[in-house]
Image (cartoon, rainbow, N blue to C red):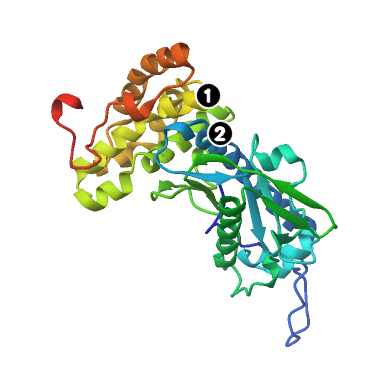
Amino acid sequence: MRIAGAVMALGLALGAGPRAAGAPPPPARIDYAAERAAIGRYQDADQRLQDVGWTLARGNARFCPNVVPSIGLQLQDMASYGAPAVAKRALGLAGDFAVQTAARGSPAAASGAFTRNREVVGLEGFDPNQWPARAPMDWTRLVRAHDHVEAMLTEHGGIAVRFADGGTARAEPVEVCATRFELMGEGSTAVADGARVVLGIGFPAFRYPEEPVFAAVVAHEFAHNVLGHDAWLDRNGRRDRNVRAIEREADRLIPWLLGNAGYDPEAGVTFMRRWGKSHDAGLRLRRGHDGWDERAEAIAAEVPQVRALLAAGGAADWRTQFRREIDPAGGLAPRRDR
């Protein structure tokens, strides 16, 4: 679980007031408390996404086709901000790297060492601050840092992280489904690309107070990745009927993913009814999805089977018992199987 391309431009407060004709403009007055609060709001939303993402990816790991070692740690790099120097000062950092989030229930969170904005100066012997950064809002160095963490977890079964305050923490990973969860600092979309689930901070579900309902939209995008939809569309084409098939399949998998993560499988129905009534008209016109009411019915139809499997064995094995809309190795599934 890590952020790769998400960046946030800081809104700098400019002092306003009279000045003599022809005089140079006064220097910008930066309200560092306001900047710190803006970063904090972004981090709060990201924490919510990472908590849910970790819960889904960890709870379904036994059924995912690809798993990776993870400690649930996200870093932040000041170079990914629109005004790196302002962000650094607002957070009280000497260097560029610090903890962004430690997903709830993860090894990073359990250690107690990875507190928000704690400055990082070493990742298993490498100081990411020494790697060159490009222009502001450059996220490539942050990707490199997270790739390095994953490599260390894979090669050494753990990673030692050194902090600027002199402390060191070592964490050992557990297996999670191979998907990254990322928050974008603007926009209101939710997408999946096979490797990532990306939500814009303006997505309506961030306003839903119930975590299981918010988790349902994350689960829908997560379903696209674990079911291999992006690669399947690359092979079979992105015609309307193909898109509808994979969207229907992702909807129907929501209760399975939620149930294995400890959420109420019915939360997927709640999400679709709440969101669909206000936001689904454009999707119906594009014909890439069924109508929201049909989608809610399809999700609801899966809930009894999921509940029965959870009651019988504690898990809902979607790898072997979920009915597919597509043939992963071919085209659309035969009509009798759909």
Residue sitting at 61 percent across and 61 percent down?
A: 145
Q: CB atoms at circles 2 and 1 under 8 Å apart? A: yes
- Give the SS element for disc 1: loop
Quadrant in which residue 253 is drawn: top left
Q: On the rendered structure, is 256 left or right of 332?
A: right
Relative to residue 146, is residue 46 depicted above or below? Answer: above
As drawn, which residue projects farthest toward the front?
Answer: 156
Quadrant in which residue 332 is drawn: top left
- The C terminus: image quadrant: top left
Residue sitting at 41 percent across and 47 percent down?
A: 191
Q: Position of residue 28 (x, y in %)?
A: 75, 72
Q: On the rendered structure, is 45 left or right of 277?
A: right
How many residues crowd around disc 1 within 10 Å: few (fewer than 14), some, or many (20 or more)? many
For residue 241, say whether it is visible.
yes
Q: Amino acid at mark 1?
A: Tyr
Q: Position of residue 312 (x, y in %)?
A: 44, 11
- Give the SS element for disc 2: helix
Say which mark, if any, is on residue 308. none
- Depth check: 191 or 19 in front? 191
Which mark lies nearer to you, 2 or 1? Answer: 2
The residue singled out by tag 2 in the image is 55
Relative to residue 99, is residue 269 depicted above or below? Answer: above
Quadrant in which residue 262 is drawn: top right
Answer with mark 2 or mark 1, whichever residue precedes in sequence. 2
Q: Amino acid at mark 2?
A: Thr
Say which mark, if any, is on residue 263. 1
Q: Position of residue 208 (x, y in %)?
A: 55, 32
How many residues crowd around disc 2 within 10 Å: few (fewer than 14), some, or many (20 or more)? many
For residue 31, say whether it is visible.
no
- Depth check: 98 or 86 in front? 98
Residue sitting at 73 percent across and 61 percent down?
A: 122
Q: CA distance from mark 2 to mark 1?
A: 9 Å
